[in-house]
Amino acid sequence: NAGVTQTPKFRILKIGQSMTLQCTQDMNHNYMYWYRQDPGMGLKLIYYSVGAGITDKGEVPNGYNVSRSTTEDFPLRLELAAPSQTSVYFCANTRGFGTEAFFGQGTRLTVV
Amino acid sequence: AQSVTQLDSQVPVFEEAPVELRCNYSSSVSVYLFWYVQYPNQGLQLLLKYLSGSTLVKGINGFEAEFNKSQTSFHLRKPSVHISDTAEYFCAVALIRGGSNYKLTFGKGTLLTVNP
């Protein structure tokens, strides 16, 4: 089992470009999350989903969008990239209450 | 809303010394508590978790943590560290409550550096 898989691992974007960070899981977990990690700031929740067709904003949703058409996939969309979106992005899932999160390997995004 | 405070951003120690990484949380309701470890250029891995029961929780790699409800703390300890324990450690909480909004809130992390 692959667990949580993120692609790409690295990406450089120019200001104003758009891109989609892909996240897929083979664990059949309902809950999925997108976090961004900045040095010294820990992980901030961008968006999360409690099941196919249901998404909700986290702490820092501005500039991002998500969709959840299937249990397996939870892509994160950046429409107009800005330097403030330079970060490492992690996708994660959980089975539900009282359970731990499983993380992908991360996507390192640089906006120049 | 819940919050997590990791009191030390960096902790340098020598190999085979004991270490304690401190975590305090704030919440108006009961919480689940977790410690994660992140090795360089990798995602986070679970070290241990507290859901209920015994307040002393043992995890992988010889780590343990103690839940102290009165002090709202969940400090992580290891009696003797190895060079390979060098990593960033994150404390996280999740609210125990009904409804669908189950999500983890993370602290800012503590970088543990083990020196020879």
Image (cartoon, rainbow, N blue to C red):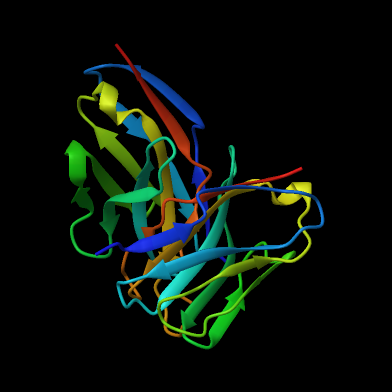
Left or right: A87 as drawn, with respect to B89:
right
Q: Quadrant of residue A70?
A: bottom left
Residue closest to the eye, A99 or A111: A111
Left or right: A106 as drawn, with respect to B73:
right
Identify the image quadrant of the N terminus of chain A: bottom left
Q: Is residue A35 above or below residue B63?
A: below
Q: Residue at image x 47%, y 86%?
A: A52
Query: Percent x, y for residue A11?
Result: 61, 48
Left or right: A96 as drawn, with respect to A109:
left
Q: Is residue A43 above or below residue B111?
A: below
Q: Residue at image x 50%, y 49%?
A: A9
Query: Percent x, y for residue A43?
Result: 54, 51
Query: Percent x, y for residue B1?
Result: 57, 66
Identify the image quadrant of the C terminus of chain A: top right
Left or right: A57 as drawn, with respect to A31:
right
Residue closest to the eye, B23 or A22: A22
Q: Quadrant of residue A60?
A: bottom right
Q: Residue furthest top?
A: B116
Residue closest to the eye, B46 or B3: B46
Q: Residue furthest bottom?
A: A53
Q: Residue at image x 82%, y 57%?
A: A16
Q: Is residue A63 visible to us here? A: yes
Q: Residue at image x 57%, y 80%?
A: A55
Query: Percent x, y for residue A44?
Result: 58, 56
Q: Is residue A9 above or below residue A5?
A: above
